[in-house]
Amino acid sequence: MYTLGEFVLRNKDHFSYSIEALLRLFSSIKLASKAIHKEVNKAGLTEKIIGSTGITNIHGENQQKLDDFSHKAFIESFKSRNVVCGIASEESKDFIVIKKGIKENPYQYIVLIDPLDGSSNIDVNVSIGTIFSVYMRKSSIQMDLTIEDFLQKGNQQILAGYIIYGSSTILVYSTGNGVHGFTLDPSIGTFYLSHFNLHFPKEEKIYSINEGNYAKFPEGIKKFIRYCQEKKENRPYSARYIGSLVGDFHRNLIQGGIYIYPKTDSSPEGKLRLLYECNPMAFLAEQAGGKASNGKKRILDIEPSRLHQRTPFFCGPVKMVSQLEKFMENCK
Ligand code: AHM
Ligand code: MG
């Protein structure tokens, strides 16, 4: 049985940068995710975690206590491991600079993170997750970090992944050499390899979309939904929607399905954030033999202009995403 650390070391040629840095990055991610796992599992027992902080976050949403706890857990954990120079989080308006001299912090990695995704599911005991994305900084190590260090195209990611806090806690990642999953054994606090080289299965089975918004969808999406429901070939597909991107993506990766979050009348740019939700999932999807698109363009090729930029997001097996793109194209 391989632990995450042992697996990373044995596959050091999967990462073109410093292996010590990768181990430190994982050390930070594991530490924070275990703290969140522990809180999630006793959420019903403690006022500390259930409910809202009473603060409206930068997206105009009610910040949950677990959102805040998770944000702080990751920031502290990355700070303590001396491997990251800057962090952008869904819970913070601006990027956060880790202040350390070059000598003390020679590593120049940039992290973008959604510390706790699917917050509407926290209080009802449904799967939630963390999504992370890592880049090399672009600016010189001698200079201050700039927003350009964070506004990189998804195709520049050197590490991306998620942690799902579900019936078990699983960490899934890719460095551009396949997608691998590790399940936490909570009795000893160790992640063990459980899903080697994940790939979307050959047969498509599922479509995942918040169909309650049907009336607000573009015509191409309505057509695609009707296509999914048609009795033809291997259709109709099953409808499955948790409302946690990590949970929906993880199930669709294992069982074969497409995740759909289009623009709507009320969210003309879509709902999901490009940099710390869509790009890491798109990177994983492609590594697992799938595809991710905004309806017209590959997600990983979008040039970002804002930290909290939103985008329509369609992600899953190539055949399904390409079919959806065709409907979108014919419906302009
Ligand atoms: P969050 O980051 O505020 O939790 O929002 C992102 C979540 C995704 O996890 C999920 O897929 C989507 O929002 C659900 O949105 P909706 O409730 O509109 O279906
Ligand atoms: Mg989110």
Image (cartoon, grey):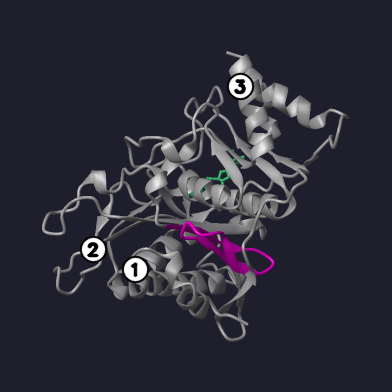
Q: Residue, x 31% and y 43% (percent of image)?
A: 151
Q: CA distance from mark 3 to mark 2?
A: 43 Å
Q: Which residues are magenta?
A: 159-181
> Marks 1 and 3: which is nearer the front?
3
Q: Label 3: which residue?
A: 328
Answer whether residue 164 is magenta in the image: yes
Q: In what quadrant of the picture does the C terminus appear? A: top right
Toward the bottom, the furthest residue is 188
Q: Main secondary structure of the magenta part?
A: strand
Mark 2 touches mark 1? (CB < 8 Å)? yes
Q: Label 2: which residue?
A: 98
The disc, 2 or 1, on the residue closer to the chain's N-terminal end is 1
Residue 60 showing in the rendered view: no
Q: Is residue 120 above or below residue 79?
A: above
- The quarter holding residue 70 reads bottom left
The disc, 1 or 3, on the residue closer to the chain's N-terminal end is 1
Task: Answer few, some or many: residues within 10 Å of disc 1's Cα (few below 14, many 20 plus, some between 14 and 19).
Answer: many
Q: Secondary structure at mark 1?
A: helix
Q: Residue, x 72% and y 48% (percent of image)?
A: 256
